[in-house]
Image: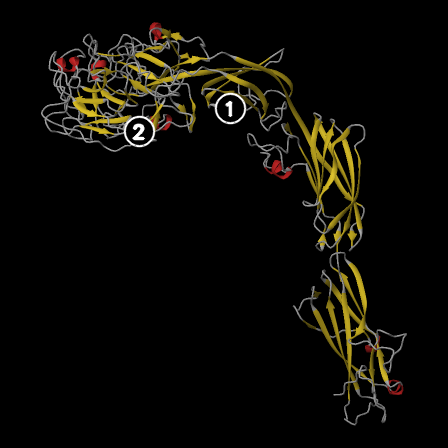
Amino acid sequence: MISKKHRIGRKIQVQCIVVLCLLLNIGNAWAEGSKDLYPVDAKGGRAYLRASTTESAVYPYPTLGTHYVYAEEGEQITLASSAQSALNKRILLYAPDGNEVTLVFEKNNGFIYKREVEVAGPRLPGQRAGESRYIPIYYTVPAGGAGVYRVEFISSSDKTTGNVLGMEYTAAAAAFNVGGGNYLSAWDISVAKKIDNSWNWVTGRVFTTAMALHNPSYNKQNQFLPNSGFYGVFKVLTKDGYVYSVDNNGSQGIAFTFMVNNQGFHKIGDPNTPAYESVPSTKALDIQSRYHDPRKADTDVVVTQKIFYNVPDDKMPEQAVAAMDGGKTWLKVQEKQLHVTDLRVEGAEGGAENQGGKGAYIRFTNENGGEYSIRIKPKNGNTFAERVLQGVTIIGNNKIYWDGKDGTGRNVSAGRVEMQVNLQLHGGEVHFPYIDMELNENGIIIELLSKDTQSVRSDKVYWNDSTIGEGGGNFGSKSNPRNASHTVIPEGISSRVNGHIWGVATDKTSSTFGDEHGIDTWTFIKGDVVSTSFDVQIKEADLEVVAVQSDKEKVKQGEEVTYTIRVKNNGPDAVENATFSFQIPLGFEPVQTTGNTGTCGSESQALAFDQEKNKYTSQVNLANQCEITYTITIKVNNPTVGPIAVEAAILRPTDVMDPDATNQEENRPPTDPHYECEHNGLGIPCNNIKTNTAVRYSEASFILIKEGYFKDINNDGFAQVGEMITYVVKVTNTGKTNISDIKVIDPLLGGVITEIPEKSINADDVLQVGETWVYTLTYILTPADIAQKGVYNLATVKGVDTVLDEEIETTSVPTQPLTPTDPGYDPNRPNHTFVPLKVNQWMIANPMVRQRIR
């Protein structure tokens, strides 16, 4: 109940109430509305119905006095209010599909103009006048029109917005004024059903989810008037079929909104988890951020329970189309029994026993939904503070996370711990949040009705005002005990003895215990306790790749390299099924493997090579301080030039803690050693991964092509001493590795060539892959050259492989080597470049022997 004091506008108070009523029947009962709140012998003050869409601190969930009514084909819905008069359209009716229906307004039909009329109620269809009964507005449900209709009211001011009061205090059983401002004094929605040509009223069809009221029960001295509290009564129907009766019992507020759901205030930022505590705040935004909007559809977790004036009609269907958010709603379901099966515990990462420091999941199958309470406690000499988990279940399979901490917030110590889990479901849970409620001196009476609604099964209630503490004001009493939660007092407290009482011995409208606080009272049905025992093995193992060593540092195409990998478990616990992996780069192929696990280790899955991933993997069992060795030989088969990066890793098993290689996510199992290390929460690397880049691979090669051209300086057609041969020397990098320190050596031309070559890629001193350097050199003919009619020449090029840092060399080749039939062919000098010379009249006829004259 959201209350508002005489200091209008800044104070709010939310109160959700229900009351035990008559059995459901079809007979001569009449009216569902204000008459039920204020019967003939009503006590306290009259609370007026607010009809305004303006939100305020007093009314965080405003409506036009919205109600809902279930009706079937052929039935008649009757409507009336203290604001309806003449032809004014002050009542709106919406069909189950959400479309407004046309109502007939005539004369003063539907006008509740005085107390006697309110108590008498409406006339049945065709009924004659008498006993002060009034004529309501009738609407006949058409064929295909069955479902939940929405009713909205407009006050006599014809305003749908604003917060105009215009009301004075009226005793609940006294005569009333028809109202003013944004409020109604009286209202009614009823359903008539025709059976055997006779019309009768059907009760238990009208409900709401949020009802805003105003009871101006104070005087000018800021005091509540005697016997002016709200004594209205309602029924609450829960989604799982239970019916509660709650008597507000004179709680003293001024403005209030009825609403009730299955969780009350939820935890900050977590709308799916009930807080089970009161909150020290009355700001509208704080309420809205901690409470599910009762005007909205239910979620998978949060259910807004339905507030009826009478015991819900048990002939309503379980579900119907409705002019409500979501387009449909639940109605009268059969009571659902609280029953769970298949209760078990598994590690947070999926292990059957190991908890691993991340906690575990309590899993079970729930047939009917509802809230749960789970108690985790030690067995057989183990000691840690009992931990209680609470929340909302779903129908079907449930998976509740336990973070591995005890009741004090500490991690349960490592080792084998025997535990017991006690699970108890809560059904029919209802919460009644009171916000800014100054006085609750008689306490609220909440009663769970029997299945046939003829008796009371329980009147137990719970609360927890620990967050309010001693800050609840200076006037009147405070709640006692301060914490009566179901975790503290599991058996609850009788609401007829102490229905969460405070504010005794004061009439102040401010500075009381409930003033400017949100105070929750709740109750539920308890199912049987289901228990299971389990052993939790909280394991920790510091797994390490100690070393990755190779038998050589340089390899070339077709060669093999062998790696020796040492893996160790530094403990303190042994592990099973830890995953070892050895990643090799593309361009290598497996040759052979050996392993030495000694007596302390073993393979649960033998080392195997995955061709697609280019990786060796195995699963190993390692005792504490156990070290094992793998030897893996691979062969070079055209990899990328450069350092060869191989990586060895050891990955913890599921639900085993590795101090520097365990990701910090709640339920993420170990699948990738890199992820475990990078998300270890420490900000430092782990020792589970080692990379070896000591081995280098190279494909360094180049060619030296040399071509000579004779230049006939005097153009006489013959070679003579002093004339020249021009040599063009080309060095080309034909491999996959850059080559530095290039030296071209030609004895014929004086040894090491010092001329600067023309370079095809860039001007640096490194022969890039694919680059060609061109040297142009001159040789002067000697008498010996003339005598042998040609010049033989062979050069050498040397360079340094930039990957292996090794010198390589090769000799020159001619552009077109001579064949045995060519003049000048010398089998002892097949790669020499031969330049023939014309001497006298002799001509070289073989076209394969090139003599170029310039």
Which quadrant holds residue 111?
A: top left
**Quarter holding the N terminus?**
top left
Toward the front, the furthest residue is 196
- In the figure, is residue 221 to the left or right of 838? left
Cα separation, mark 2 vs mark 1, equals 29 Å
Q: Residue 147: give x, y in percent of width and height.
A: 30, 26
Name the one closer to the observer, 528 or 223: 528
- Classify mark 2: helix, strand or loop: loop
Name the one closer to the observer, 527 or 221: 527
Residue, disc 2: 324
- In the figure, is residue 468 to the left or right of 23? right
- In the figure, is residue 626 to the left or right of 132? right
Residue, disc 1: 398
Residue 6 is at least partly visible in this image: no
Which quadrant holds residue 718?
A: bottom right
Name the one closer to the observer, 106 or 408: 106
Q: Amino acid at mark 1?
A: Asn
